[in-house]
Image: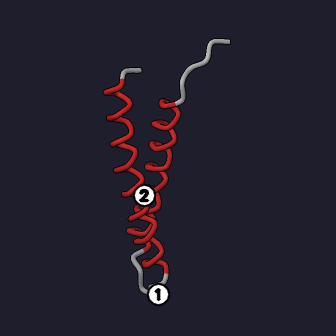
Amino acid sequence: MKSGDITEINRLLRELREEHRDLDLAINRMTQDPWQDQLHLRRLKKRKLKLKDWIASLESKLIPDLDA
C-alpha cells in the first residue's frame, strides 16, 4: 500500500470516528427525552452501525498482509 493511500485512510478514519462519536452523543441525548422521535433515533443508530462497519473495514486495510 502506498504512503498516500495510508495517509488518506487515516484521514478518513479520523473523520468517521468523529462522526461516530457525535452520533453516540446525539443518541444518548435523544434517549433521555421522553418525547423523542423513534424513527429519527432508529436512523441515527443505523448510521452509527454503518460507520462502525466502515471504520472496521478501513482499519483492516491498514494491517499489512503477511505471506504464510
Is 22 placed above or below 33 here? above
The reply, left or right, for residue 21 in relation to residue 15 is right
Residue positioned 43% across, 78% down in the render? 30
Q: Quadrant of residue 2?
A: top left
Image location of residue 54, percent across then percent down: 45, 42
Image quarter of residue 12: top left
Q: Earlier in the sequence, mark 1 or mark 2?
A: 2
Label placed on residue 48? none
* 56 over 29 or under it: above or below: above
Point out residue 10 in the picture as x, y percentages from the top left corner.
Answer: 38, 40
Single out the residue that lies furthest toward the right.
68
Category of crowding for the residue at label 1, using alpha-carbon neighbours closer than 10 angstroms: few (below 14), some (14–19), many (at least 20): few
Q: Nearer the viewer, residue 19 or 49?
A: 19
Q: Name the secondary structure under disc 1.
A: loop
Q: Nearer the viewer, residue 27 or 61?
A: 61
**Front tag of 1 and 2:** 2
How crowded is the residue under tag 2: few (<14 C-alpha within 10 Å), some, or many (20+)? many
Q: Tag 1: residue type? A: Pro
Q: Is residue 65 above or below residue 9?
A: above
Q: In the image, what residue occupies the spot 38% across and 57% down?
A: 18
Decide if residue 15 is on the left or right side of residue 38.
Answer: left
Q: Identify which residue, 58 or 29, lies in the foreground.
A: 58
Which element type, helix, strand or loop, lies under badge 2?
Answer: helix
Res. 34 mark: 1
Q: Say if mark 1 contacts mark 2, CB within 8 Å.
A: no
Which part of the image, by quadrant, shows the C terminus? top right
Residue 47 picture location, percent across and down: 41, 55
> Which of 50/63 is in front?
63
Query: Mark 2 highlights which residue?
Result: 20
Quadrant, the N terminus: top left
Location of residue 5 in the rendering, given as x and y in whole percent from the top left corner: 34, 27
